[in-house]
Amino acid sequence: MALRMEGVARSFRAGGETVRALADVTLAVERGELVALVGPSGSGKSTLLSVAAGFEAPDDGVVTWDGEPVPRAGAGASRWRRDTLGIVAQEPQLVEGMSIHRSVGLRLEAAGVAPSEAQRRGTRLLRELGLGDRLTHRPEQLSTGQRQRAALARALSTDPQLVLADEPTGSLDSQAGRALVELLRRVAHERRRAVLVATHDQRMIALADRALTLEDGVVRPAPRDATRQAG
Ligand SMILES: Nc1ncnc2c1ncn2[C@@H]1O[C@H](COP(=O)(O)OP(=O)(O)OP(=O)(O)O)[C@@H](O)[C@H]1O
């Protein structure tokens, strides 16, 4: 049981043209595995994650989690986003003007965690991501890479069943990038979570359990040697 996408299509109309981002995507991400999604810029990786999360409806095809359609609206969608999903978009979403520690804490409290426990967990996660000396800082006081890590801490704080991350190591130096890849591996392997990461990062691709390429709107298994050579 896991995330499944079957025959998923998604196009956009812009400037009088139709852009077919996803033509016919079929994939599964099982609990306990870290899957890397690779593909050229503009190949539809962000679109795929957004459809998987239920933020966007596919034009065609189905998206399910544990056999149930991923909810896209109403109370079901709110519950799914709060309790099951942890997503980090390419532009990290944090609450402006609020310390990152509070931002993580609030997500946990919204999920029913007591404030003292929320504080403790937030501190631990942010420390683990190398932000122990930035707890009281607000997003606008942080670098892009630090914001990315804070957004990941927020997404992971509730121990979500499904983790979707868009280029999470994009702005990180090699040490921070490595720590993040290792954290995502632990989430997949030790917590038995399903983790799907859009990435160009060779370390992530090498350390993922599987790599998929998205090209021409279709997902295929990426032979690991080929992805290493391509990078
Ligand atoms: N809201 C939108 N309206 C029109 N076109 C869009 C929209 N969102 C995405 N697209 C188009 O769909 C295609 C896929 O975009 P997407 O952001 O999913 O690619 P990507 O693989 O994540 O790219 P990158 O690696 O550069 O982030 C692109 O050609 C993009 O221009």
Image: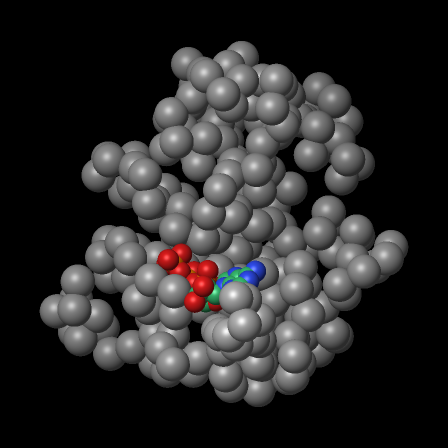
Where residue 87 sits in the image (x, y, percent)?
57, 50
Say above or below: 173 vs 210: above
Say above or below: 117 vs 214: above
Where residue 172 sits in the image (x, y, percent)?
30, 37
Where residue 161 sits in the image (x, y, percent)?
62, 56
Residues 121 and 72: in front is 72
Name the side, left or right, on which 221 lies relative to 5: left
Residue lying furthest front in this view?
16
Say above or below: 89 vs 210: above
Where residue 195 sits in the image (x, y, percent)?
49, 59
Which residue is at a point 63% across and 28% down the rendered structure image?
A: 95
Name the side, left or right, on which 41 lies relative to 164: left
Which residue is at a point 57% across and 42% down the rendered structure image?
A: 155
Name the side, left or right, on which 161 lies relative to 116: left
Residues 226 and 132: in front is 226
Residue lying furthest left in this view?
229
Which residue is at a point 38% across and 74% down the rendered structure image?
A: 214
